[in-house]
Image (cartoon, rainbow, N blue to C red):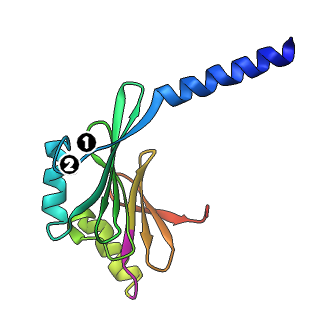
């Protein structure tokens, strides 16, 4: 009987997780919030969207966008950029000038391929796989050695 209850409980939990978190593919021109379209037009004018997904979790939505240059972007429920990951140099317009200047001065042979906002910090990834952490005032904190 205990084994049956564990199985039943596991199935209920799995169902709740599935129902509470679903992804919905959307057409890039349709249903994409204006704020996200504006961001993409401003910073990636020559790129096109090849995939757009709304990740619905409880009452919030996040948006995952993939561009034709293999760049992935994630926007939070407020439609604010939270994560950018690419293989090529990110547009200077998506990085604060203070962070960009720090990288240019301290890593002159490298460039930024990724940016993420995480727990009140910013993290940039360089093309040499070095991750640098900055605070919200764009001041350098440390090299991230967690990977």
| Residue 21 on the magenta span | no
- Using the image, determine if residue 65 lies above or below residue 128: above
Which secondary structure type mostly characterizes the magenta part of the structure?
loop
Q: In the image, is 122 to the left or to the right of 28?
A: right
Q: Mark 2 points at which residue?
A: 36
| Residue shown at 16% from the left, 50% from the top | 29
| Residue shown at 24% from the left, 71% from the top | 91
Few, some or many residues within 10 Å of mark 1 (<14, 14–19, 20+): some
Displayed quadrant of residue 139: bottom left
The kind of secondary structure element at disc 2 is helix
The x, y position of residue 73, in whole percent, is 33, 56
The x, y position of residue 75, in whole percent, is 31, 47
Q: Earlier in the sequence, mark 1 or mark 2?
A: 2
Q: Nearer the viewer, residue 127 or 101?
A: 127
- The span picked out in magenta is 109-113
Q: In the image, is 42 to the left or to the right of 110?
A: left
Few, some or many residues within 10 Å of mark 2 (<14, 14–19, 20+): some
- Using the image, determine if residue 134 lies above or below residue 12: below
Q: In the image, is 48 to the left or to the right of 88?
A: left
Q: In the image, is 91 to the left or to the right of 24?
A: left
For residue 79, the mark is 1
């Amino acid at each position: 009987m205990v084994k049956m209850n564990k199985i039943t409980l596991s199935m209920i939990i799995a169902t709740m997780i599935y129902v509470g978190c679903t992804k919905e593919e959307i057409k890039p021109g349709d249903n994409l919030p204006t704020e996200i379209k504006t961001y993409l037009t401003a910073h990636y004018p020559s790129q096109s969207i090849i995939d757009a997904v709304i990740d619905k979790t409880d009452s919030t939505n996040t948006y995952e966008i993939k561009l034709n240059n293999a760049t992935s972007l994630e926007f939070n429920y407020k439609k604010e950029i939270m994560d950018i990951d690419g293989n090529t140099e990110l547009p200077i317009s998506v990085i604060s000038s203070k962070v960009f200047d720090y990288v240019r001065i301290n890593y002159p042979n490298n460039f930024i391929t990724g940016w993420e906002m995480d727990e009140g910090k910013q993290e940039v990834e360089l093309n040499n796989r070095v991750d640098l952490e900055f605070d919200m005032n764009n001041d350098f904190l440390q090299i991230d050695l967690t990977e």
